[in-house]
Image: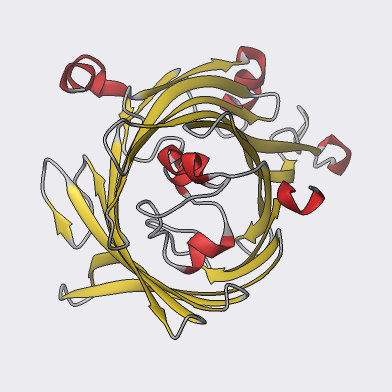
Amino acid sequence: MLVSFGALGQTARKYSNEFMNIGVDAAALGMSNTVVSFTSDVNSGYWNPAGLTALEDNQLALMHSSYFANIANYNYMAFAMPLDTESAVGISLIRFGVDDILDTTQLIDDQGNINYDRIKRFSTADYGVTFSYARNLKLKGFSYGINAKVIRRIIGDFASSWGFGLDAGLQFQTDKDWKFGIMARDITTTYNAWAIDKDKFNDISEAVEGQNQSLPETTEITIPKLQVGVSKKFVFHYDYSLVTALDLNVRFAENNDIISSSFASINPAFGFEFGYTDLVFLRGGLGNFQNETQFDDSQTTTFQPNFGVGFKYRGIQIDYAFTDIGDQSAALYSNVFSLKLDFSIFR
């Protein structure tokens, strides 16, 4: 990892491929993403693939959310299945895109006349496909999982890129319902290679004199991130349950996180899920703690609250979350809906 940083530091990006860090599943988002230690369904392929070993049947998940006043749309779907009693596999697709963007670079013709017929539309979209494999270890209570990711990013006809990377996760459960989890994202420093249409770039570079005169870099390196979590489940009078969770999100870069240094920044998150008869769920969480500088140069600490509810009947689960887009964002809160289907209902 350190060798990669040293050799390719000039193209490393703190927030490259950041759409892959927004999060999936309204149940997890409502808990401020504090699920790395106890995730155990089809969505584990995203949060911690080690959790896929808990699957007892095939599962399908769908999610949709809109951000920036419905300008950007985030869609997710995933499928996972057990291979046997010790292992499981999964696949997921994420699309985060903005469609129908106005291209006004050719609005003014060579004679200086404004011609609205010269306006075109284009879309920019990011795609992430993840292949997951998980297996129980011979050590009691331990399981591990690995993700292989393919990233495809498209900016109209101007540019596109392909990227590849790996994630790895580990979970451990004690006999007393304590659970621990570790998720390492982009452990190989996910690599993106861009292809830029030079003819399209020339159109842009000539649109505003003195700007966009040089081609941007055509490679990006996404630095690793680490998420460590612990959770505990309590059961009251058989019908009521409470899951409490604490996660630490680590980035190997200096930023405004509540704990930050030149080597790494750490951001804690707290979440809970209150359930009744495994039918109705109420969720909440606090995360994204930031040190912010005010106009008078004073320092304040801010955080992001999240809220969610869920309903589960037999093999169908519908969840809702009221949440922000996530790290470093000033976006308005959004309504997120997700659906999970367990194929056991067809047996």
- Relative to 117, is 57 on the left or the right? left
Residue 128, given in percent of the width and then of the height, sits at 57, 33
Where is 319 relative to 7, above or below? Answer: below
In the image, residue 268 sits, relative to residue 59, either above or below, namely below
Instruction: Report which quarter residue 206 is drawn in.
Output: top right
Residue occupying the point 72% across, 40% down: 104
In the image, residue 127 lies at what x, y percent?
A: 61, 33
Left or right of 109? Residue 170 is: left
Q: Position of residue 106 (x, y in %)?
A: 74, 33
The picture quadrant where one finds residue 2 is top left
Question: In the rendered view, would you say 179 is above or below 295?
Answer: above
Quarter where residue 155 is shown? top right
In the image, taking residue 139 as reference, residue 313 lies left or right, namely: right
Question: Vertically, is 141 above or below 338?
Answer: above
Where residue 263 appears, x then y in whole percent? 12, 40
Q: Is residue 256 visible?
A: no
Which residue is at a point 65% across and 58% down the rendered structure image? 65
Q: Is residue 170 left or right of residue 279?
A: left
| Residue under the point 44% across and 64% down | 330
Q: Where is the N terminus found, in terms of image quarters?
A: top left
Front residue of 344/59: it is: 344
